[in-house]
Image (cartoon, rainbow, N blue to C red):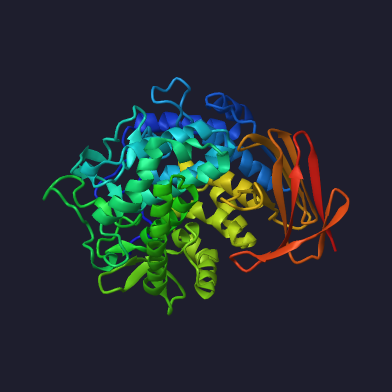
Amino acid sequence: MNEPFQCTGCYIRPQRLFWQGADKVAKLLKRSLLAATLFAGAMAGAQQASHPTQLEFHSSNSSLDEIFRWARGQALAYVAPSSSSIGPWYDAALPGRNAFCMRDVSHQTEGAVVLGLAAANRNMLGRFAASVDEKRDWAGYWEIDGEGRPSPADYISDADFWFNLPANFDVLDAIVRMWRWTGDDTYRDDPRFREFFRRTVTDYVTRWQLQPEKILHRPRIANQRLKTGQFVHSRGIPSYTEGPKDFIFGADLLAAEYRALRSFQQIAVTPEDKALAASAQSAAEKIQQLLERIAWSQSEQHYLGVIRQDESGFESGDVMTLYFGAAKDPDHLRGALDYISSPKYWQKINIEEESYAPLLLFRYGRTGPAYHILFDLGRPEKPRREYPEVSYAVIAALVGGTMGVVPSRSGEPFDVQTLAQLPSAGDDASLQSLPFRNNLLDIKHTGSLSSSLSNRSGPALRWQAVFQGTVRQLNVDGKAVLARHDILPGGIAVSSVTATVSPGTTVIVSRME
């Protein structure tokens, strides 16, 4: 049986094994284990970052404290020395590879940015964006090594290289997310990013036959230039699932394409790009409808992972469909959440796919399963826990899930949102020195009763404080304010208020039952 989401770019591929350079791997793992067990290791790693992290997390739940300390130390152990010839970066591939991969980087950015690695994110995403070229049918370099070259583990020539088609879309969405997190308009205005956006939503889609009217009839591997070679049958795999061969595209490809076309609209700034983004929304809608029609299994009540020519499918595409926010049918959304909330599912998948699950389950209000998987990822005996993606995903889940920190999208009437999702109602948790755009923030949740935000430095910030449940009023610094009400995508009712937090001040919002 083929393992779903197999290897996803940097693990064990059917054709070859990548546990090469055993001495380098051993040295890196030794360094990682030391950092995971010693707080001093975390701070030493921080000194290598372009902007040294001061991020702290504390909770009355000792297990959360332990998993944070491990994840921070492990993640920072992968930060390249400040003397790196290619600028700031961190490992985002198989340990010992000395490289960063498009899929891994796209996923690791959220954990990295809160650890103070915004410059590394921008550097790596920029290198991927600059690598797209017509000679490679507008694909970027799947993996870049520590010298800034396409990794020899994946690249022989422009006609013979490894590439998974969701990657360009994934990187585009990551760029937009980092723009929202950092407020760094380089992501929006730099010509290399603008060119990457345009090429990805036009030429890349066309060259790989990913238009909604063509994708059902495309060959599995399009644009094959050579009959033989090391990677000619992997030059454009239409999914992150790499094991099986009898399919024409994965649900993750549709979901990533949908999200990229949507995300481009947030960051398009010139009249030409705005027009291009607007015209792409029709294709986005059709891709999403195709995903719902083709990938959803009514009999199995979840999204299938890969689709054959006859429109049948197999494996699971639920994690990536939800990760990219591509599930719109409420019944399908609930079915996908039920599927990945089951231990029967997440206990048998590989660690790359498992690492996506905690944060997305938090985002859809499935707090219990989110913590089960989060604690599973962090347990010391967990096989392959040292894979870089895991520690970055744990940090992202604690910040974005436990603390519920989310940056606003374009046009929303706030800058940052919080929503406590603690293991139990009696727990509390806090973040100190969280970098967010031009601010440095402290955030604290006391059970489900109150939240506070301190704006330690930076301009005034609009904070949307969200609480689970429906209440008429919330107390903002002792003053009753009418609450707004909403329903999260997973069906959870919430109440919220928005408060402006001036520089050097703290605002406390609490429930009024």
Q: Measured along the vertical axis of the image, is residue 142 above or below residue 148?
A: below
Instruction: Please indicate whether residue 314 sits to the left or right of residue 419 in the image.
Output: left
Q: Give the residue furthest to the bottom.
A: 299
Instruction: Please indicate whether residue 120 sits to the left or right of residue 10 in the image.
Output: right
Instruction: State the image quarter where residue 57 is shown.
Output: top right
Which residue occupies 26% across, 74% down?
Answer: 310
Q: Position of residue 157 (x, y in %)?
A: 19, 38
Instruction: Please indicate whether residue 417 sits to the left or right of residue 128 in the image.
Output: right
* Foreground pick, 45 / 512: 512
Q: Looking at the figure, which quarter contains the C terminus?
A: bottom right
Instruction: State the image quarter where residue 484 is shown.
Output: bottom right
Q: Measured along the vertical axis of the image, is residue 320 above or below residue 294?
A: above
Q: Position of residue 422 (x, y in %)?
A: 70, 54
Which residue occupies 29% across, 46% down?
Answer: 139
Which residue occupies 49% across, 43% down?
Answer: 108
Instruction: State the image quarter where residue 43 is shown.
Output: top right
* Foreground pick, 192 / 20: 192
Residue 3 appears in the picture as rendered: yes
Q: Measured along the vertical axis of the image, is residue 60 above or below residue 425?
A: above
Q: Looking at the figure, which quarter contains the N terminus?
A: bottom left
Q: Position of residue 59 (x, y in %)?
A: 73, 45
Q: Position of residue 235 (x, y in %)?
A: 23, 49
Q: Give the residue furthest to the left.
A: 227
Q: Give the residue furthest to the right.
A: 478
Instruction: Please indicate whether residue 169 sits to the left or right of residue 326 in the image.
Output: left
Count of numbered marks: 0
Residue 351 appears in the picture as rendered: no
Q: Give the residue furthest to the front.
A: 271
